[in-house]
Amino acid sequence: MAKVAAMAMEKVDAKDREKIEAVRKVMRKQAPLSPKQAEYCNDACVERFLRAKGDNVKKAAKTLRAVLSWRETIGADHIIADEFSGELSEGMAYVAGHDDENRPVLMFKIKQDDYPKYQPQKSFVRFLVFTLEVAVASMNRFVDQFVLLFDASKQSPSTPLRSIKRERKAEADSA
């Protein structure tokens, strides 16, 4: 019974369907979508862009097109887990489940000696994108956010995350 109710909640009503299709139509007028781009632009994805842009079809389409262009630039559709087998086996980043609002919780555990692994920065960006893609894939269509946690407990006092933490504490103490 609960499964049937959940499936009913996932269905897109006619008004939402119309807006989703309007976004896709605007995008197709700009340029055809590749099969990978069309797959990325599923109903849940387009709905998130619509909500983010206040249900404005043109703004949602423009922003989504920019995201597709960025994804193409970094090769997001060609990132695979095998590329990060070492990082994943060490538990450097993972989806740790979902919070009470059904948002995916992403955990990053990066130690100071891990930083050199990500030179050039493009490798780290690809790892970050891969992890975010896993989180977004686990979201239902009504969820627009995720929780991102960085475990800096293994950082030395000179690392950037520790410095930020000290600065924030100092700001809070002086306020």
Image (spheres, rainbow, N blue to C red):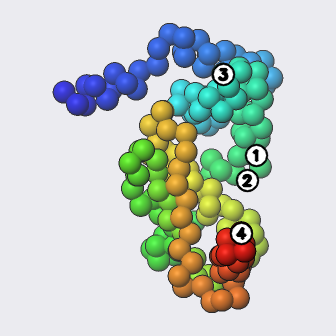
Answer with mark 1 or mark 3, whichever residue precedes in sequence. Answer: 3
| Identity of the residue drawn at 46% across and 47% down | 103
On the image, the x and y values in percent for residue 25 come to 70, 16
Residues under numbered marks 1 and 2 in contact, where contact means CB atoms less than 8 Å apart? yes
Residue at mark 1: 70
Answer with mark 4 or mark 1, whichever residue precedes in sequence. Answer: 1
- The foreground one among 87 and 78 is 87
Position of residue 114 relative to residue 129, above or below, is: below
Camera-side mark, 2 or 3 = 3
Q: Amino acid at mark 1?
A: Trp
Residue at mark 4: 175
Camera-side mark, 4 or 1 = 4
Work out how far the residue at label 1 is from the one at label 3, CA to CA, in angstroms.
22 Å
Residues under numbered marks 2 and 3 in contact, where contact means CB atoms less than 8 Å apart? no
| Identity of the residue drawn at 78% across and 29% down | 62
On the image, the x and y values in percent for residue 52 come to 66, 33
Secondary element under disc 1, as helix, strand or loop, is: helix
- The foreground one among 156 and 166 is 166
Secondary element under disc 3, as helix, strand or loop, is: loop
Q: Residues within 10 Å of mark 2 (few under 14, many from 20)?
A: some
| Identity of the residue drawn at 77% across and 38% down | 66
Position of residue 169 relative to residue 26, above or below, is: below
Residue at mark 2: 74
Residue 29 visible in rendering: yes
Work out how far the residue at label 2 is from the one at label 3, CA to CA, in angstroms.
28 Å
What is the residue that sits farthest to the right in this orientation?
Answer: 30
Position of residue 88 relative to residue 21, above or below, is: below
Answer with mark 2 or mark 4, whichever residue precedes in sequence. Answer: 2
Work out how far the residue at label 2 is from the one at label 4, CA to CA, in angstroms.
41 Å
Q: Amino acid at mark 2?
A: Ile
In the rendered structure, find residue 140 and report the number of the disc placed on it. Answer: none
In the rendered structure, find residue 55 and report the number of the disc placed on it. Answer: 3
